[in-house]
Image (tube, rainbow, N blue to C red):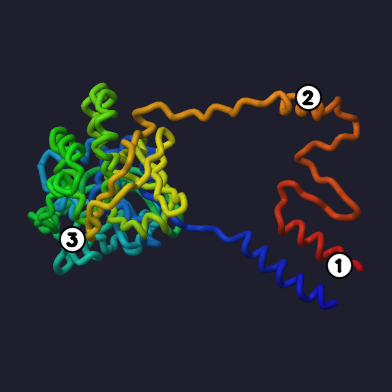
Amino acid sequence: MKLKVLILPLLLLLAAGGTTTTTAHNITRILAKHPDFSTFNHYLTITHLAAEINRRRTITVCAVDNAAMNDLLSKRFSLYTIKNILSLHIFADYFGAKKLHQITKGSTTTSSLFQATGEATGTSGYVNITDMKGGKVGFSPVESDSDEPMATYVKSIEELPYNISVIQISHILTSPEAEAPTAAPTDLNVTSLMAKQGCKAFSDLITAQGDGDTFAQSLEGGLTVFCPSDDSLKSFMPRYKNLTADGKISLLLYHGVPVYNSLGMLRSSNGLMNTLATEGVNKFDFTVQNDGEDVKLETKVVTATIEGTLIDEDPLAVYKIDKVLLPRELFKVAQEAPAPKSAKSRAREETDAPGPASDDAVPADQNSSNGGWRIVRGGGIVALLFSLVLGVLLV
């Protein structure tokens, strides 16, 4: 009887654990499935808004297509001003397609990330949402003087109630305060610092290719750079020269991660990392993996190891690595060749080869029984424990 009492709570606990679901979301992954939003997706990454979106449990993202983003970029705002403008497109509340068309009294005001992060003064970071005639939904910052909405709802891209809603709107939302010039948060010169700390060859490539501004601007929310040693870069240069201009830019940006990571953080946060080159369907990510005390970066084409630290002062960390990181978007994925078999192994395989199946053979994906125990290949431990409890209760 005591056995029954002990098993039943354990069974219920495991069964409950088996139904647990996670609600984590990744805005970069969501938008990567839709190439029309690749520019919007790219700027969410380099402004570090993507990380803020992923951190929040309830969020709405109003994405705009590449044409609308091109209109914004043509105004040549600084990256910090673009961040403020895009912050107006991120609401600290959930608005799916159904909720947008069922707004109480036809209109509501919601707080955007521009307001929530304290960058806006007064109520300039709020956005009005209006359910209009003909099934349209309009969006306008509260600072807008026009009676017409600045943008309208186009379609739902992806919804995970009531966690994240990603919708498309027709035009950029902006305001005078969001467009106001914003000073850079730091005067650190990334390329100059790398050149002085033993990473001159890589720094020279960044400067020559014109990517220095991207690295410098990314310092706002933190930046980690993995710098190939001069020797590894020297041997790689013939392949680098064969890349297209866009390929060279992507390769260099691939060595930057738009988040500050100390060495301790890298060791404790193994997994995929987006890079400055991540954009649209081109993931340009790699995997951080510990190997004892070593930290390795795996791209599926090559595996590099961190050899030393050039600088580690928040918001910037620069590490020297022993190989150039080769993204699978630009280089052929390495194929692991099977190990050659010995004569003894081949002989054993021939001896162990199965004969013709009998009529009573049980398919591999079906259940079988063994002395009253029900063994389920794909059913998991919960099904097995139910059988165990049933057997105990019948005793």
Q: Looking at the picture, how far across and down is residue 202, in whole percent?
A: 21, 38
Instruction: Name which residue lies at 61% across and 60% down.
Output: 19
Badges 2 and 3: C-beta atoms under 8 Å apart?
A: no
Q: Hey, which residue is sitting farthest bottom in the picture?
A: 2
Quadrant in the picture for the N terminus: bottom right
Where is residue 223? Give x, y as percent: 25, 52
Is any part of residue 113 visible from this angle?
A: yes
> Which is more foreground, mark 1 or mark 3?
1
- In the displayed structure, 169 sits above or below 111; it is above
Quadrant of the rendering where the C terminus is positioned: bottom right
When asked about the image quadrant of residue 337, the answer is top right
Q: Nearer the viewer, residue 65 or 102?
A: 65
Q: Which mark is residue 142?
A: 3
Front of the two marks 2 and 3: 2
Give the residue at mark 2: 350
Q: CA distance from mark 2 to mark 3?
A: 77 Å
Q: In the rendering, which numbered label is found on residue 392?
A: 1
Q: Disc 3 on helix, strand or loop?
A: loop
Disc 1, SS: helix
Does any portion of residue 64 appear in the rendered image? no
Mark 3, residues whose alpha carbon is within 10 Å: few (<14), some, or many (≥20)? some
* Residue at the image point whose x is 31% and y is 54% from the top: 131
Q: Nearer the viewer, residue 78 or 111?
A: 78
The disc, 2 or 3, on the residue closer to the chain's N-terminal end is 3
Q: Amino acid at mark 3?
A: Val
